[in-house]
Amino acid sequence: MGFTNIYGVPHWNDAEGGGRHSTTIIDGKAIAARVRAEVTRDVAAFTARTGRRPGLATVLVGEDPASAIYVGGKQKASREVGIEPYDHRLPADAPSSEVEALIERLNAEENVSGILCQLPVPAHLDGVHLTGLIDAGKDVDGLTPLSAGLLALGREGLRPCTPAGVMVLLEEAGVDLQGAEAVVVGRSNLFGKPMAQLLLAANATVTTAHSRTRDLPAVCRRADVLIVAVGRDRMVRADSVKPGAVVIDVGMNRSDDGLHGDVDFEAVKDVASAITPVPGGVGPMTIAMLLRNTLQAAEMAHSEVPA
């Protein structure tokens, strides 16, 4: 399994026995910038063709500072590519019925191509229930039961942004997934499960590992492609990685010495053939894929309108 990556920075390592090999540091910021440029071009073409801009509606309940920053970033990114942002904010004590009514209204609005309910929601609300109310055709997070079912069946639909972004990184890195052994560490509905489904669709042989996996380091060492998303600071060490593996780090953990992923980057980069850094790896791809999904939702809705 080999790769070439024009967006990566070669890192030369001294291998055992005196030889040297290069590790590619996969530049997610550069790849995300290219995706955004493509979306900008295609949004302009869609708007010229239909007379309507795609629209992204965000729903934020409460005043969680991190969520407010995330939503603001999504709104700003939308404007930058020509997507119309619609910002909906409700107080932290808003009853479920009020949030449900807003989502139903957005489902019916023609100018809204995509809907995103920012998670987590306040404790008295059910985020899974609220997300499930979003029309699957506008589910730009790819998290509704119908979207999950379409993914499982290999049918066309909107895919979860972060797993879809990882697939773009692997493609840009030239990773051949046909028959490759892929290990996904993490089984969340948000990432682990859809990531495994996307890898299966690409004909990889997939193992999903988690906190109950016996001898997790040994399972990780089998991987040609190792993808880690568990939220534990630098838990994957060099001795858990097969020499020459491609390592994708989805984690983002703040500690006294800075921001780190779930992979011990400094140690693993001397073993892997390619690796994503934190920050600057997977993170920038999430919003880029959200923008792509919003355009895809607009295209799908327009194709369903009778001529």
Image (tube, rainbow, N blue to C red):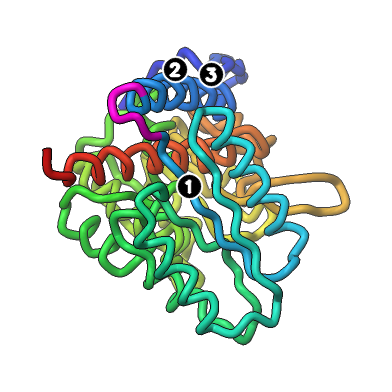
126 part of magenta stretch: no
Mark 1 to mark 3 CA distance (whole Å): 31 Å
Q: Is residue 46 left or right of residue 94?
A: left
Q: Position of residue 236 (x, y in %)?
A: 59, 51
Q: Position of residue 241 (x, y in %)?
A: 50, 43
49 part of magenta stretch: yes
- Residue 16 seen in the current view: no
Q: Residue at x 34, y 50 (%)?
A: 159
| Callout 3 secondary element | loop
Q: Which residue is mark 1?
A: 56
Q: Is residue 120 left or right of residue 307?
A: right
Three-letter code for the amino acid on which mark 1 is drawn = Leu
Q: Residues within 10 Å of mark 3 (few under 14, many from 20)?
A: many
Report the number of numbered marks.
3
Task: Name the image quarter holding residue 51.
Answer: top left
Please say if the residues under marks 2 and 3 sit with CB atoms less than 8 Å apart: yes
Three-letter code for the amino acid on which mark 2 is drawn = Asn
Residue interval drawn in magenta: 48-52
- Whether 221 is drawn above or below 175: the answer is below
Mark 1 to mark 2 CA distance (whole Å): 32 Å
Q: Position of residue 237 (x, y in %)?
A: 61, 48
Q: Earlier in the sequence, mark 1 or mark 2?
A: 2
Judging depth in this view, the residue of 66 and 269 nearest the camera is 66
- Whether 121 is drawn above or below 116: the answer is below
- Residue 5: assigned label: 2
Figure quadrant of the C terminus:
top left
Name the dominant secondary structure of the magenta segment: helix
- Whether 137 is drawn above or below 11: the answer is below
- Residue 84 seen in the current view: yes
Three-letter code for the amino acid on which mark 3 is drawn = Gly
Q: Residues within 10 Å of mark 1 (few under 14, many from 20)?
A: many
- Residue 8: assigned label: 3
